[in-house]
Image (cartoon, rainbow, N blue to C red):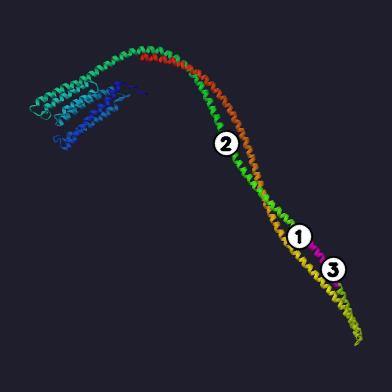
Amino acid sequence: MEKRELTALEDYVNKVYIMVLLLVPGACQCAGITYTIEKVIGWLPTVSWIALIVFDCTCLLYLLIGIYFIRTGFEDNLVKDQKLKSGKIYIVLIMFTQFNFILYMVPSCDFWGFSFFFVILTSFFLDGKMVGATIVEITCSLIVSWIARSEVLLPVHNQYFNANMVNRSVCVALSLPTIWLLCYFVQRFLVNAKKDEMERNNERVQNVLKKVTYIAGELGNASSNLLETTQVESASTQELSAVSETLLESSQKMIDMAETSKTNLDELKLSSQSMEEKMHNVDDISNNLVGILSTNEQSLNQLLSMSNEVEKSTQQTKEVTQQLLSEASEIGKTLDIINEIAESINLLALNASIEAARAGEAGKGFAVVAQEIGHLAESTKDTLSIVNDVVCRVQNGTNNVSECMNTNALRFMEQNKVIVATVDGVRAMMEMLKESVSAVGKADNIRLNQANIIVSTVEINEKIANSIQNENEEFKNIANMLQGNAEEVLNITQQVDVINRMVKELEALLE
């Protein structure tokens, strides 16, 4: 629920109600604290502790009651009439009790001056009755106290006593009624002036209302026109909003596709780098293969040369072997001759034995046999010489064969080394060929991936081109809408001019 706006007078009463209900008990409480301190110091030896404690407690109680009045005195942000009346009575009673309490408790001939302070506090309410009651009670209290405790509350009886009493009386008699008159005149004439001003304002308000009624009709027509224009503008705005959302979604899609295209291009870049690395690897492998093939070619040429040399050596070995075979056949023939000689010797020996047995001591036959044996010995000697030559030749041939075999063995060993090196080179070449094939396969896969990415990027670019074309169409629609909105804005401007003219008329009426 909205709070009612307060008038200046109501706001003033609210603030005065709070201030006086706190200030009057607070002032009494301050007086009680001051007197208590003076009592402790020893400045008030005749003041009773019991009376001082009772005074302090009553001041605290009055302050709590004032807070209670404040907390319960408002309704709808305004002081209740009953609470305001009760608060005024409460303030008057506090002043009567506490003012008299101090007069009879504390011996001070100057306390009468505080009467003006209490009366001024009540005058804030602008209530003449309240101020009058306060003046009467304080005046009566002063007169009674001056009579009852003249020795304490009145000036010293000297040559100035009468003058001081007259001055006091005149001060009280003039000041307190003056405060009441001030409150009376403020209350009466300001309130009446306010009422008269309100009546004049009512007449002016009636005239203004008539004019405002006419202007309100005109404003109603202008508002209807503005409403129609606003509805058209609202529809255009909604359409623009929808188009803007469509453009936003399209832009977002284009951004996503651009990101995808960027990602694809990054992948293409990485693929190109990988392809370049693979091609470098293939190039290096190819160069290594060329070097190995060159080395293998040289090894094979060397192996071919060694094979030719081995072939020649083998041919020589074959010829030596054939020669050995021929020599061996001659040795066989020689052995046959030796065999025949041996048989002949055996026969001669047999005949010699027979002749020797037959002749006995006769030696002619034996001489013949001996002669034949001598011839046979010579023949055997010649044959042995021939055999010796043949054996020498066989030995020489065997040595040649042995040397050829050793040479062939060394060449075969070198050939084996070359062959092993060639085989190792071929194996290394095969490994490199495998790596080259693998790299070529990977490069082919990368190429296929690049081809797919290129196709995807092309499709995305086509979609982006289509989106841009659609956005161009939407921008054309927006341009048309803006042109229509410009016409509507011109119409609104005319209506605003009409309303401004009416507002000026209202301002003139208000003036």
* 62 is higher (above) or lower (below) than 387: above
Three-letter amino acid code at disc 2? Answer: Lys
- Residue ID for mark 3: 329
Rounded to the nearest angstrom, the CA distance separating label 1 from label 3 is 28 Å
Three-letter amino acid code at disc 1? Answer: Val
Three-letter amino acid code at disc 3? Answer: Ser
Q: Is residue 385 left or right of residue 67?
A: right
**Res 430 seen here:** no
As rendered, which of 249 and 195 lies closer to the eye? 249
Range covered by the magenta-colored residues: 314-335
**Foreground: disc 1 or disc 3:** 1
As rendered, which of 201 and 400 lies closer to the eye? 400
Local secondary structure at mark 1: helix
Q: Is residue 322 rendered magenta in the image? A: yes
As rendered, which of 304 and 489 lies closer to the eye? 304
Image x and y of residue 477, in percent:
55, 22
Instruction: Mark 3: give few (<14), some (14-19) or many (20+) Cα within 10 Å.
Output: few
Q: Which residue is outermost to the bottom?
A: 361
Q: Quadrant of the C terminus?
A: top left
Q: Who comes first in sequence, dot 2 or dot 3?
A: 2
Rounded to the nearest angstrom, the CA distance separating label 2 from label 1 is 69 Å
Local secondary structure at mark 2: helix
Q: Is residue 214 left or right of residue 337?
A: left
Q: Who comes first in sequence, dot 1 or dot 3?
A: 1
Q: Who comes first in sequence, dot 2 or dot 1?
A: 2
- Residue ID for mark 2: 262
Instruction: Report the disc number at residue 310.
Output: 1
As rendered, which of 203 and 68 lies closer to the eye? 203
* 298 is higher (above) or lower (below) than 387: above
Q: Is residue 390 rendered magenta in the image? A: no
**Residue at position x 50%, y 22% from top?**
237
